[in-house]
Image (cartoon, rainbow, N blue to C red):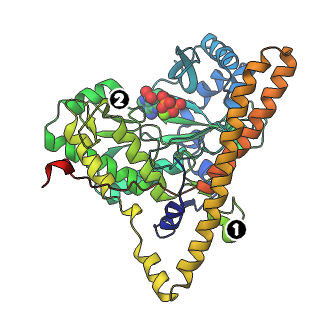
Amino acid sequence: MQTTFMDVFRSQFFPKTYCFLEDPVESWIEAYDFDTHHPELAAPLKSIFVKAKIATIFSEPFSYEEEKIRKNVEELKQNHFTFLASRRTREGDTLPFYSALEHPRLPGWVLKPCGSKVPDSRFILGPANSLNDMAYFHPYDGLYRIPMKERIRKIAELEDIPLLVPKKFYAKIPFCNKENPLENTFVIAEKLDVLSTQDTLKMIKSMSTSQQSLLAYRIGRLIQLSGFLDASLNNIRLTPNGEIAIIDTEPAGFLKERGEFPKPFWAGYGHQGTLEKSGRIGLHLLRDQFLDKSLSTPDGKKVAFKGYESFKEMLDTMIDQDYSLKPSSRKKALAVLSFGVLPVLWAIQSLFIHLVLHFLTDKYMYLKKKHADRAILYQYVPYPEKKAKEAKMKYRLNLYLRLIHYFQKDIPKVQEVKLSCPIPASAIC
Ligand SMILES: Nc1ncnc2c1ncn2[C@@H]1O[C@H](COP(=O)(O)OP(=O)(O)OP(=O)(O)O)[C@@H](O)[C@H]1O
Ligand SMILES: [Mg+2]
């Protein structure tokens, strides 16, 4: 889906709010220290880490290599950890994953290592929607779970939306001598009594239409106002009493620390999610889980799975009325007060971004095709040479992909509403 000049120009008028952490992550780690809040659990926590390998797994970046994941999982299993998360293998099997763990010595708590999930060598596509909006993970996402949880909790309070979020603390990895919080800290969360994703769906299905609408509105509003974008039903659940619970509050690249990026005029650029963009991704993600992809109405609209119509309709309404895809009054005022100078500058900037994006996308597609064509030839070259060539090509592809998303940042592709005549023209005399 190519970004047009109009997409870029229009997006200049949309509201864009950048949200930062006011205090550095170190202050959060101090304020939410597990040992201080739960000194009685310091000894059992320490006893879990007496094997050096456990501390190493907790302090390393997350691995994407199946072999390494299996090895770490085996090591943790032998040390009585159990796994709450899983990943899909290339063959489509389910592999336990160590992003959320339990241990019998800490009943009632979930341990969440905070290693970076952003490998240097690959460009990981984050949650996305059909408007070209995409999120980018941030190395500190694991550690920002607590500030994000607080953000969501405060917004729920302000909006009078009943919400459960687990208590979360930072724990220092025992016997770890690393300095960087990414390597020496993990998050420990109170285990909430939540329904499984499937049971959450069943409960939604059993609700009346008005209950479904209200629930969708409450969750949708939380997503839009807090910028919570990883809004899958893996992370948002219902409790047996029907309360909303958000158990995984990783901000997925949305929150940043102030001063983390170059400050001057391009401070707004780069892999930063605006509040509006994050909200859009979250709302779409949630709505899309209720779509029956095999069905659509005659005008091309996707249909909800049977029994979830009101839930989906409410989210559709919120998406259709999304204020973030309309010119903001601030931007309109600026355009008028500048006597049209700003819109002209925005148009020049938009043309530049559009042309750069066009060039980068063409180049990326060309390289991708070249890569696919060459794959046949690579079959006949020795393995080490083949691996080196593929690595070089992947590096180039990733570079272009990074640049495309750098320029694309928060330019949504606003879908045009096409009005077509329902009666065939030939039937009109
Ligand atoms: N505080 C909690 N209370 C109850 N269950 C939890 C809690 N935290 C995590 N879980 C369980 O562990 C699973 C994985 O946790 P989490 O979502 O934090 O990790 P993840 O790597 O993002 O996994 P996923 O990709 O499945 O969302 C959740 O889907 C949930 O079933
Ligand atoms: Mg999750």
- Circle 2 is placed at which residue position? 193
Vertically, is 108 above or below 33? Answer: above
Q: Position of residue 71 (x, y in %)?
A: 68, 14
Residue 191 in sight: no
**SS assignment at label 1:** loop
Task: Judge depth for marks 1 and 2 and give the one in front.
Answer: 1
Q: Position of residue 282 (x, y in %)?
A: 42, 46
Vertically, is 290 above or below 10? Answer: above
Label 2: how many Cα within 10 Å (few below 14, some 14–19, many 20+): some
Task: Give the CA distance from mark 1 to mark 2.
Answer: 43 Å
Q: Is mark 2 within 8 Å of ligand 1?
A: yes
Q: Residue at x 38, y 47 (%)?
A: 283
Q: Amino acid at mark 1?
A: Lys
**SS assignment at label 2:** loop
Mark linked to residue 263:
1
Q: Position of residue 235 (x, y in %)?
A: 42, 35
